[in-house]
Amino acid sequence: MSSNCPYDIIEDNNGSFWLPYPLGVLKVSKNMLNDFAEGKIDKIECRIFDKFDGVPSEGLTPVARSIKTNNGNIWIPTLNGMLMVNPDKIAYNTKPPLTHIESLYADDVSIDIRKPIRIGSKIQHITFNYTAICLQATEKVLFKHRLVGYENSWTETNYNNKLATYTNLPPGDYTFMVMAANNDGIWDETGDRLSLYVEPIWYETTIFKIAAVLFVLLLAYLFFMMRVGQLKKRQKDLERIVEERTAKIAKQNQQLAELNATKDKFYGIIAHDLRGPFNAILGFSELLMTNLHDFSTNKIEQMLSNVNSAAKDTFNLLENLLEWVKSQTGRIEFEPQLFNLSDVINNVVSFSENMAQVKNITIKHNISSSFMVYADKNMVSTILRNLISNAIKFTNRNGNISIEEDQNPDVTVITVCDTGVGIDQETLQNLFKLSEKVSLSGTENERGTGLGLILCKEFVEQHNGKIWVESELGKGSRFKFTLPTHQSI
């Protein structure tokens, strides 16, 4: 404590006290001392002159007293003579220094601060190096720094300690700020700053947390579905037992007929829009049940063919309806991939051959076995299945259906051609509009709702493609749609 005690105190003509002490000469305002004593202020600002200002601090001595001459100069004794101070000519440095962040190191590896900074989750410590440009008494420059987002207060350092180190920072966004003050305490209020982001460890990321929650929900869902499956199985077992007991009791034909009539009535209520196809199925099946031995083999085959046709129409309608509902509710995942189009066409043609053979219609295509497209395989299969099914419906017996392709650099045009009855212009305008459902009968009274074409349009548009039809009454139709040739969706 005694080494910092002043040797002397002397007042100048400007109302300031000068106090030589072991480290230099201290100047403080007399008014400020009075205000501090009266409690008007809580700190005293002073200026210290040391060796960096030309004061031989090591030569100051308490042996002799300081004096003030008539012209106001102050003479302070030193071991090597007298130090003269002219208070009126003391210059103050009013220009703040220019603060600059020089570099950033992460685990002793230099980071390019000219680019957006991302600190990896495995980094243990980071160090900022900074400096300041000051033309006077550089060694007396002071600094203060702060890492916004991590600390609330400023940390002050001197010119010999121009760095800041932080260890094990939590993940998040941070801004390092630093300011400098010159030898007279004038701060560079603008300072310099540097923003950075500390990445979280993989198990601390939002994606992992969401995935963990989804995994737990999936397990809960699977458990729930397993439980539901067990309950359904138990319910089916109970229903089977009830049906077996009912079958034993209901031995008479009248009871069986009443049961069938009840079922027919129930089906008629829940399938109002499917009444036609179901009536056909039920009608022909009842004729076969009651008059099986009275019909010839050809007659039986004809009836079975009619039943099969009605069942296929009903199945196709329900399948299209289900696909359309899924597409409207977003439950169909769009999964494009590069695949061989010829394989898909062969599968669809094979599926449709039985229906085509009934009318002796020939289906052919010229698609190369190496022809590739980039699309959703299941959606393309549904599009082709509907277009070929419609072509069969509206083509007369002994007609022809062909599938063609025209490949361009970006898209491929697929065409389904038929030699059918064609479509008039008014019907063409409303063919793909959901608000204007078009229901036409085929050449042999096959029924259709137009829902298949609407489904085709939505699937094609999911591929950023388009679908259209060229048709002339009596000459047939050409349904065309586009698919990407390569990955562009």
Image (tube, rainbow, N blue to C red):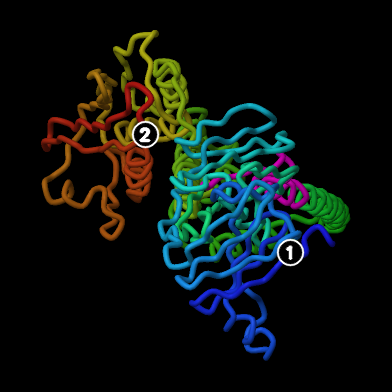
Magenta segment includes 195: yes
What kind of residue is marked 2?
Ser
**Among the 4 quarters of the image, the one containing residue 487:** top left
Please, what is the dominant secondary structure of the magenta stretch? helix
**Secondary structure at numbered mark 1:** loop
- Residue that appears at 50% across and 66% down: 73
> Which x, y percent locates residue 195?
53, 47
**Secondary structure at numbered mark 2:** helix
Q: Is residue 176 shown to the viewer in this render?
A: no
> Which x, y percent locates residue 229?
80, 50
| Quadrant of the frame with the C terminus | top left
Magenta segment includes 422: no
| Lateral position of residue 156 relative to residue 472, left or right | right
| Lateral position of residue 243 relative to residue 474, left or right | right
Where is 152 relative to 403, above or below? below
| Lateral position of residue 175 relative to residue 438, left or right | right
Where are the magenta residues, as a range? Answer: 194-217
How far is the residue under mark 1 from the one under mark 2? 112 Å
Q: Outermost residue toward the bottom?
A: 38
Q: Which residue is mark 1?
A: 7
What kind of residue is marked 1?
Tyr
- Residue that appears at 60% across and 57% down: 148
- Whichever of callouts 1 and 2 sits on the residue coming sooner in the sequence is 1
| Quadrant of the frame with the N terminus | bottom right
